Image: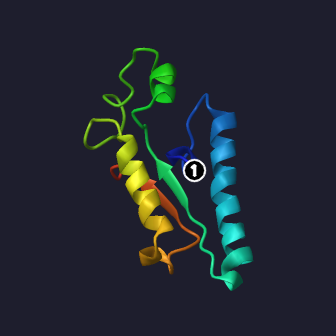
């Protein structure tokens, strides 16, 4: 699992951003390594997700209201898991080496 931080930079979160960029880069390298065995590798990069981690980070602030979120709401965990479920299914067997953004086009 990556994060929107894996394809963008955010001030004051250098270590987190670096780790998520590492996940995205490793995804691309691993996809080449295992493709001959018919295995696909992708990264899922959600924006703020409605989890305990988000609420701990936000410390009562509304980070979404002042962000580039188009829908002005948090991503729900089920929205992330539905993409993960699809990527694990046979329907996505030719989809690989991609970082999928769940960001309401915030980076567009």
Q: Residue 62's x, y, as percent? A: 35, 22
Vertical placement of 49 versus 8: above or below? above
Q: Residue 102's x, y, as percent? A: 40, 52
Residue 94 in view: yes
Judge left or right: residue 22 versus residue 61: right
The coloring applied to the image is: rainbow
Q: Residue 72's x, y, as percent? A: 27, 36
Q: Residue at x 34, y 28 (%)?
A: 66
View extreme (bottom): residue: 36
Vertical placement of 72 versus 3: above or below? above
In this view of the protein, which residue sits in the foreground, 85 or 43? 85
Q: Residue at x 34, y 36 (%)?
A: 74
Judge left or right: residue 93 versus residue 27: left
* Mark 1 neighbour density, 10 Å: few (under 14) some (14–19) many (20 or more): some
At mark 1, the secondary structure is loop
Judge left or right: residue 7 versus residue 47: right
In this view of the protein, which residue sits in the foreground, 88 or 108? 88
Q: Residue at x 69, y 82 (%)?
A: 37
Q: Residue at x 42, y 51 (%)?
A: 81
View extreme (left): residue: 71
View extreme (top): residue: 60
Q: Residue 30's x, y, as percent? A: 71, 68
Quarter holding residue 75: top left
Vertical placement of 55 versus 51: above or below? above
**Circle 1 is placed at which residue position?**
1
């Amino acid at each position: 699992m990556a994060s929107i931080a894996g394809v963008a930079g955010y001030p004051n979160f250098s270590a987190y951003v670096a780790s998520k960029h590492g996940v995205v880069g490793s995804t691309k390298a691993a996809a080449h390594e295992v493709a001959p065995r018919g295995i696909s590798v992708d990264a899922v990069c959600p924006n703020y997700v409605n989890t305990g981690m988000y609420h701990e980070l936000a410390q009562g602030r509304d980070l979404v209201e002042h962000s580039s979120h188009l829908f002005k709401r948090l991503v729900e965990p089920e929205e992330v898991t539905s993409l993960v479920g699809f990527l694990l299914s046979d329907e996505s067997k030719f989809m690989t080496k991609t970082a999928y953004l769940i960001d309401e086009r915030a980076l567009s």
